[in-house]
Image (cartoon, rainbow, N blue to C red):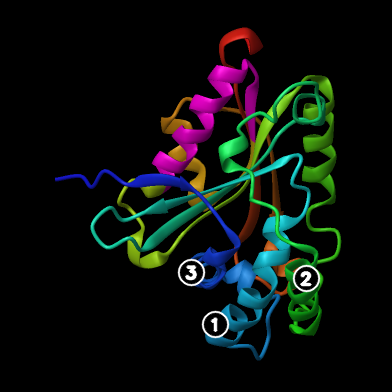
Amino acid sequence: MTTAWKILPCTVADAPALARNNMSAFWTDPNWRIMWPDCTLDFIIAQCAERVPRNLLRDRVTLRHEKAVDPETGALVGYARWVLPTGLAAGPGPAPWAEAQIPDVSAEESAAIEKKADAAWWEPVDMEGSDDESIGIRNRILASKPYISLDYLAVHPENMGKGIGTELVRSGMRRAEELGVGVFILAFQAGLNVYLRLGFKEVDRVVQDAAKWGGEGEYAVYLLTYEVGRAK
């Protein structure tokens, strides 16, 4: 029987669970791990947890955050971050998709969050130039017309293959339908089949030899769009 995962907004209190979920997910990618030589996953999770609250609070006008939760245990099992097009997010009237906007905190809380984030160690090895071409293509696509962008998707390895990522993406797609704008994703191989099954179309791809940066196999990036409603 398929679990009906609950898709809920995030808060800064989710930081420890988000750090564990997100870093564990990316740690399965050998081409991501090469940015963290001599580091353990536990260390990266601990440092990330100190930084997550600040990341959640940045760019509140345009960023939206949702988590997938196990309805029986309440455990966080997945995360998605979306970017609204500036013209839509900063337009007149109520903030769109406001329920997925991180609630603001007091000045005192903000200062404490900044202090903890600044004290965390976060020095990944720079894979210089690895994303230059794909980012250039992304920027051209996003300049052509408004899109909601899926900026981050992570499901803990323990929960892979359970439909969690699919439900998180569907949530954003439903909101895009309501707002009448398309969806853009800069995707990696791990999530590609999820997006294609949901109806995304490949616009372009950039495939490079990961050995340039000390990695293994291919470093592939796929640029996908989903046109909805008035966006078609």
Q: Residues within 10 Å of mark 1 (few under 14, many from 20)?
A: some
Sequence-wise, the earlier of marks 3 and 2 is 3
Left or right, 141 with respect to 203, comes to right
Q: Residues within 10 Å of mark 2 (few under 14, many from 20)?
A: few
The residue range painted magenta reads 165-184
Residue receiving disc 3: 17
* Circle 3 SS class: helix
Rendered residue at 34%/67% (across/down): 158
Q: Amino acid at mark 2?
A: Glu
Residue 175 place in picture, x, y as percent = 54, 27
Question: Which corner quadrant holds the N terminus?
Answer: top left
Rendered residue at 66%/71% (across/down): 215
Rendered residue at 81%/30% (across/down): 90
Left or right, 176 with respect to 186, comes to left
Residue receiving disc 2: 108
Main secondary structure found in the magenta portion: helix
Q: Which mark is residue 189?
A: none
* Circle 1 SS class: helix
Residue 77 place in picture, x, y as percent = 39, 59
Q: Amino acid at mark 3?
A: Ala
| Labelled pair 3, 2 in contact (Cβ < 8 Å) | no
Residue receiving disc 1: 41
Residue 48 place in picture, x, y as percent = 64, 75
Magenta stretch encompasses residue 172: yes
Residue 105 place in picture, x, y as percent = 70, 59
State the residue in front, 220 or 124. Answer: 124
